[in-house]
Each structure stands twice: as C-alpha cells, then as structure tokens.
Amino acid sequence: MAAKSENGTELNLITPGTVFEGKLRTPGSIRVDGKVVGEITATQNVSLGSAGDIDGNVSAKNVTIGGK
C-alpha cells in the first residue's frame, strides 16, 4: 500500500501480519509493522513500528526503530 506523506513523497506500508521476503527499494519512505526478511533501501525514511520485525540490512536517509 502506498500513500503520499506530508512532504509529498510516497509512503509505503507493510502492515501487521504481512511477511515480505526479498529486496525492497522505494524512492520515498516505508513503515514496517509486519515482517521483512531481506534488504530495504529507501531514499527517505524507514520507520519500524513496535510490532515490526526486519531481518536484514536497512539503508535510508533516516531510520526510526520501535520494534526489532
């Protein structure tokens, strides 16, 4: 799911219960409340919610961690 954030860039969501495996690249931002197994590359921000789980490398302008 993608929506526009306040600054006009795309905001992608990995919702609770969703599992993504592989390489994920976005020109905007992403929030992870589900699970990602693999690599995330974002031009803007990556936010990990309290229920989120990332098992892999993360590359972004800003990273906010609330999960594991």
Image (spheres, helix red, strand yellow):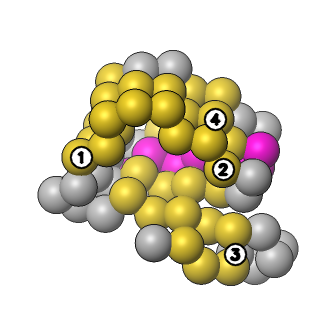
Judge whether residue 37 is colored magenta: no
Give above or below for 59 relative to 29.
above
N-term mark: 3 or 4: 3
Which numbered mark, 3 or 4, is in the foreground of this view?
4
Span highlighted in magenta in the image = 43-49
Residue at image mark 2: 26
Asked if disc 2 and disc 4 are in contact, CB closer than 8 Å, the reply is yes
Distance CA(mark 2)–CA(mark 4): 6 Å
What secondary structure is found at the residue carrying circle 4?
A: strand
> Which of the numbered marks, if any, corresponds to residue 5?
3
What secondary structure is found at the residue carrying circle 1?
A: strand
> Which of the numbered marks, if any, corresponds to residue 19?
1
Q: Position of residue 58 (x, y in %)?
A: 56, 27
Distance CA(mark 3)–CA(mark 4): 17 Å
Q: Position of residue 2 (x, y in %)?
A: 55, 73
Judge whether residue 44 is colored magenta: yes
Q: Residues within 10 Å of mark 2 (few under 14, many from 20)?
A: some
Judge by depth and name the residue closer to the eye, 58 or 38. Answer: 38
N-term mark: 3 or 1: 3
N-term mark: 1 or 4: 1
Specify the amino acid type for callout 1.
Answer: Val
Specify the amino acid type for callout 2.
Answer: Thr
Q: Is residue 5 visible?
A: yes
Residue at image mark 4: 41
Give above or below for 33 relative to 22.
below
